[in-house]
């Protein structure tokens, strides 16, 4: 989401890192470029003005003048101001109240409220061990109720369908009663949306809010809408006491302006970032981590948390037992497991986004980090017989043609995969040999990755 903003910000700040001395003139020059970067990212103009004014005031002061490395001090100031705009600290859901804790979702049609309700139910069940009830107050779109019921079954949450669907307030009250009867810890109420803000929608959601007095009122907004996200946020903020924001579709081609605008305009903290349609695509929002990602510093903490949560430990231990034990023990099944684990972590794009310095990679290198390549490699391995996956050396001319045909790829792709598997076999053996580690690290570009340019790059 922040690729272009990250590139522009780091580019303008990089030019100051090497300066032995920072003056008011070159600070203001850098801030002009930062201003352009923020405006291009669709950050609301009042937010941009405030950010530039605060950053310039701090940068021209003693914090920079007294530093041994003024360029680094300026980056630190920008990082801290980004954190301030994004909310300083993580804001968690208020779940420490008497059950059922009511969470009300509000937002425009198409923002992703219903999908977010399902994702949030899954997150609360898996990470907080809560019993969750889902209900929809959308009396205009029956498909929304059916969709929420399906999502509830997929995340193993309870679902309540009201007998009457003529009044949103009645449905909300009946949902609370059902939550009490079923001893649910959390009730997530989905609400109706419109294509644009109108008084009828605002009046309805105000009445629903007054009826159930929710502990959380989460404004769900599509991060792709840019400036419109700020305008919509302002309208909902005036109608409801928002307690938090959920930014959806953050894996799309968004410029990132919504994240920097909504928090300051509403005063409500961003609590979650939503990605994709999969029900595990909702993550708590950490302002400090996102500020680091925007400035190209990566987000290693989030990556570690994802690995701990999503990586299959049995597979990891199985692979670890093969390290250094002889390259032949690392088969195609093991390689497929690793590729699938990578997919579970959000794919190459998500991994690269969290590693420091990745925003500085050339576009040609980024183009090779395409998740379609990973899926193609998995398809090739799936087209092999169990014996071929165990003994890849058996794969010759006619077998390669059959595998390529079965996976919808070319023979060259099969050859490339076999070559990369050989490289991984060698690496697995060398990792277990401490005396070979220094040589191995020298062969890896930048001290990490696969020999010969990385895996799974090279597929077209």
Image (cartoon, helix red, strand yellow):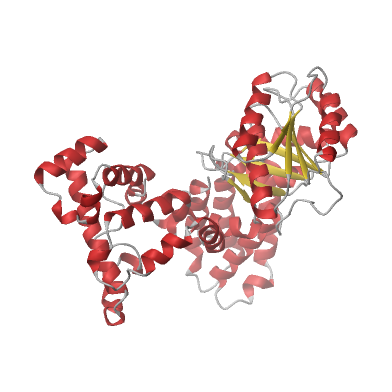
Q: Quadrant of residue 454?
A: bottom left
Q: Is residue 172 above or below residue 403?
A: above
Q: Quadrant of residue 55?
A: bottom right
Instruction: Estimate the x, y position of residue 105 in percent, counting from the top left.
Output: 74, 36
134 vs 307: above or below: above
Residue at left 22%, top 65%? 328
Q: Quadrant of residue 162?
A: top right
Image point (71%, 25%), residue name: 193
Q: Is residue 89 visible?
A: yes
Image vertical order of residue 377 relative to residue 423, above or below: above
Tell me which residue sits at (65%, 24%) in the image: 146
Q: List x then y, in percent, for residue 270.
A: 69, 48
Toward the bottom, the furthest residue is: 435
| Percent of width and height locating residue 433 | 29, 78
Q: Position of residue 6 (x, y in %)?
A: 51, 52
> Closer to the camera, 363 or 159?
159
Say which residue appears at 68% left-offset and 40% top-offset.
157
Q: Quadrant of the C terminus?
A: top left
| 94 and 350: which is toward the camera | 94
Q: Residue furthest left?
A: 397
Residue 442 visible to the viewer: no
């Amino acid at each position: 989401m922040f690729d272009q903003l990250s590139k522009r910000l780091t580019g303008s700040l990089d030019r100051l890192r090497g300066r032995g001395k920072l003056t008011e003139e070159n600070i203001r020059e850098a801030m002009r470029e930062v201003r352009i970067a923020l405006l291009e990212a669709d950050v609301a103009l009042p937010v941009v003005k405030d950010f530039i004014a605060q950053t310039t005031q701090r940068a021209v002061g003693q914090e920079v003048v007294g530093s041994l490395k003024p360029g680094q001090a300026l980056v630190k100031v920008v990082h801290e101001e980004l954190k301030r705009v994004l909310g300083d600290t993580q804001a968690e859901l208020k779940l420490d109240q008497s059950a059922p804790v009511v969470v009300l979702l509000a937002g425009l049609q198409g923002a992703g409220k219903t999908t977010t309700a399902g994702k949030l139910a899954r997150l609360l069940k898996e990470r907080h061990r809560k019993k969750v009830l889902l209900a929809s107050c959308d009396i205009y779109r029956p498909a929304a109720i059916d969709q929420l019921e399906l999502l509830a079954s997929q995340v193993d949450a309870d679902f309540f369908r009201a007998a009457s669907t003529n009044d949103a307030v009645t449905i909300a009250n009946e949902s609370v009663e059902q939550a009490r009867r079923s001893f649910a810890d959390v009730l997530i109420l989905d609400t109706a949306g419109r294509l644009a803000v109108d008084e009828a929608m605002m009046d309805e959601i105000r009445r629903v809010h007054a009826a159930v007095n929710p502990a959380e009122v989460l404004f769900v907004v599509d991060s792709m809408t840019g400036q419109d996200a700020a305008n919509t946020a302002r309208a909902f903020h005036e109608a409801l006491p928002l307690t938090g924001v959920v930014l959806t579709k953050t894996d799309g081609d968004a410029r990132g302006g919504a994240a920097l605008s909504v928090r300051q305009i509403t005063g409500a903290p961003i609590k979650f970032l939503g990605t994709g349609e999969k029900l595990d695509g909702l993550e708590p929002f950490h302002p400090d981590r996102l500020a680091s990602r925007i400035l190209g510093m990566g987000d290693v903490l989030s990556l570690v948390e994802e690995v701990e949560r999503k990586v299959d430990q049995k597979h990891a231990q199985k692979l670890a037992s093969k390290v250094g034990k002889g390259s032949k023990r690392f088969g195609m099944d093991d390689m497929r497991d690793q590729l699938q684990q990578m997919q579970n972590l959000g794919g190459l794009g998500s991994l690269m986004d969290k590693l420091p310095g990745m925003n500085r990679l050339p576009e040609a290198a980024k183009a090779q980090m395409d998740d379609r390549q990973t899926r193609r490699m998995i398809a090739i391995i799936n087209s092999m017989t169990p014996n071929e996956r165990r003994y890849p050396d058996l794969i010759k001319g006619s077998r390669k043609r059959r595998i390529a045909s079965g996976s919808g790829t070319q023979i060259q792709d099969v050859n490339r995969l076999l070559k990369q598997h050989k490289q991984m076999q060698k690496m697995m053996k060398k990792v277990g040999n401490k005396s070979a580690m220094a040589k191995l690290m020298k062969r890896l570009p930048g001290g990490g990755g696969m020999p010969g340019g990385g895996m799974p790059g090279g597929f077209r």
